[in-house]
Image: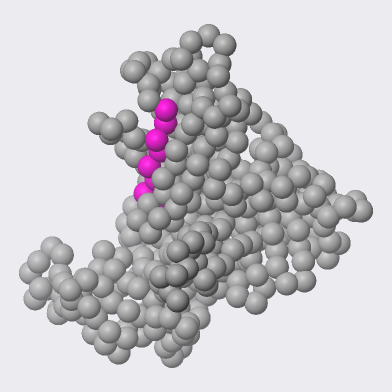
């Protein structure tokens, strides 16, 4: 599979597209005025505690207070061992843990979306290229994308050896086949970074930003720019030189794959990214066969419907349905990644009477979703023939970033025809 990264660095915003075999599969936007706050660490002050929701609102210095759920509170990080011993419960209530005015160190795990503020956690994570350090969790995990058992065993043993006492580590995919010295060097860096964050957190007032995560370009280099990527195209000389410097520090050996785009066309037009973005903002997506899928977002979930459309097949109905569903499964996985759809997703494939055909379609969907870096989980097919799945939601979806809801129809996109009712 040919994988490319295309970055359009403008005056006010940075846009990055990821292509697989020439098709756009992921798209990121970061505006220089607002920027991204996911991953940032703040010293916050508890504004109020809500026992009925088992949550608290935390002032971290933004327009809206952040939301902290009880399950995202790490008890060890709060201290007060004597007080905690009096709770005598495995899962204390939020009012036992936090009090208004209390200062705590939190990390943003979900960007503000719509009218909701950011979601935060006291379980801090610090991501590197090869490792993720979890200073407040005692756990070792290995990326599920590393499939060879021997390599998984080697990396787990190395992680157990290197991790600081009572801290956790997740070994990332990029660590596969890397040497001990490289991984140890990053472990030392992350450990020192955590010590700096702790010291700054202890000496700072609340609310205050304690640590800002990397910007979009740096995160793309850290998280996406692996040896699988054939080329990283970027459209300005200044940004090109910066990327080369970042790659030299984070991913040495890949500098020659960074390329300065000097064409006359806009870089996104050259790679046909702009038309794909336009399609990704549409409700209906056509398949090559003539079939199509319809994607509808609601407050509770996203519903995806599959239709044969213009495709009539050339054998029989079952064959036509199977081919349409298999093609749709691949396109649905791509659209979910591209649109960055999160939460509950319901897929209504065309009805299949054959259990074998159902399995083939589910397998095709699962295979395509393995390419997704965001965690997804397929629950199976319901008695109504609907596929249920979930996808972790961290950022705003594509339409939330690039579009605004119409103030007149509030997103319905319909005109009232019985005007006499309002006159």
Residue 199 can be seen, yes or no: no
Q: Residue at x 66, y 43 (%)?
A: 24
**Looking at the image, residue 278 lies above or below residue 292:** below
The dominant secondary structure in magenta is: strand
Q: Position of residue 161 (x, y in %)?
A: 42, 49
**Looking at the image, residue 217 lies above or below residue 320:** below
Q: Position of residue 156 (x, y in %)?
A: 42, 42
Residue 356 can be seen, yes or no: yes
Q: Position of residue 155 (x, y in %)?
A: 46, 41
**Looking at the image, residue 311 lies above or below residue 47:** above
**Which quadrant of the figure has residue 175?**
top right
Q: Is residue 37 magenta?
A: no
Q: Position of residue 392 (x, y in %)?
A: 42, 52
Q: Give the residues drawn in magenta, as a range.
A: 343-350
Q: Residue at x 79, y 55 (%)?
A: 234
Q: Residue at x 66, y 50 (%)?
A: 277
Q: Residue at x 40, y 55 (%)?
A: 298
Q: Nearer the viewer, residue 35 or 178?
A: 35
The C terminus sits in image quarter: bottom left
Q: Nearer the viewer, residue 219 or 404?
A: 404
């Amino acid at each position: 599979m040919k994988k490319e990264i295309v970055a359009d660095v403008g005056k006010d915003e940075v846009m990055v597209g990821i292509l697989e075999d020439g098709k756009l599969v992921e798209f990121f936007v970061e505006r220089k005025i607002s920027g991204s706050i996911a991953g940032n660490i703040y010293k916050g002050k508890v504004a109020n505690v809500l026992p009925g929701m088992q949550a608290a609102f935390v002032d971290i210095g933004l327009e809206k207070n952040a939301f902290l759920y009880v399950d995202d509170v790490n008890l060890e990080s709060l201290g007060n061992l004597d007080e905690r011993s009096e709770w005598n419960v495995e899962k204390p209530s939020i009012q036992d843990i936090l009090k208004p005015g209390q200062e705590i160190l939190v990390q943003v795990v979900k960007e503000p979306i719509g009218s909701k503020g950011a979601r935060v956690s006291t379980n801090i994570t610090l991501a590197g290229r090869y490792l993720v350090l979890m200073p407040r969790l005692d756990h070792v995990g290995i990326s599920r994308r590393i499939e060879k058992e021997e390599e998984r065993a080697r990396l787990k043993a190395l992680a157990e050896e290197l991790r600081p006492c009572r801290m956790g580590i997740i070994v990332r995919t990029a660590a596969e086949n890397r040497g001990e010295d490289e991984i140890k060097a990053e472990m030392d860096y992350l450990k020192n970074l955590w010590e700096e964050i702790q010291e700054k957190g202890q000496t700072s007032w609340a609310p205050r930003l304690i640590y800002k995560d990397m910007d979009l370009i740096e995160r793309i280099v850290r998280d996406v720019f692996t040896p699988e990527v054939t080329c990283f195209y970027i459209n300005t000389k200044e940004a090109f030189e910066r990327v080369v410097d970042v790659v030299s520090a984070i991913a040495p050996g890949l500098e020659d794959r960074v390329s300065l785009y000097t064409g006359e066309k806009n870089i996104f037009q050259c790679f046909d990214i702009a038309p794909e973005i336009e399609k990704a903002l549409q409700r209906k997506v056509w398949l090559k066969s003539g079939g199509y899928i319809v994607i509808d977002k609601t407050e509770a979930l996203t519903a995806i419907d599959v239709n044969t459309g213009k495709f009539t097949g050339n054998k029989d109905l079952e064959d036509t349905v199977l081919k349409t569903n298999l093609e749709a499964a691949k396109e649905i996985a791509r659209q979910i990644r591209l649109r960055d759809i999160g939460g509950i997703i319901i897929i209504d494939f065309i009805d299949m009477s054959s259990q074998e055909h159902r399995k083939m379609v589910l397998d095709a969907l699962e295979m395509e979703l393995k390419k997704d870096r965001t965690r997804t989980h397929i629950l199976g097919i319901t008695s109504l023939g609907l596929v249920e799945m979930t996808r972790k939601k961290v950022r705003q979806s594509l339409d939330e970033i690039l579009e605004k809801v119409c103030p007149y129809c509030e997103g319905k996109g319909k005109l009232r025809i019985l005007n006499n009712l309002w006159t």
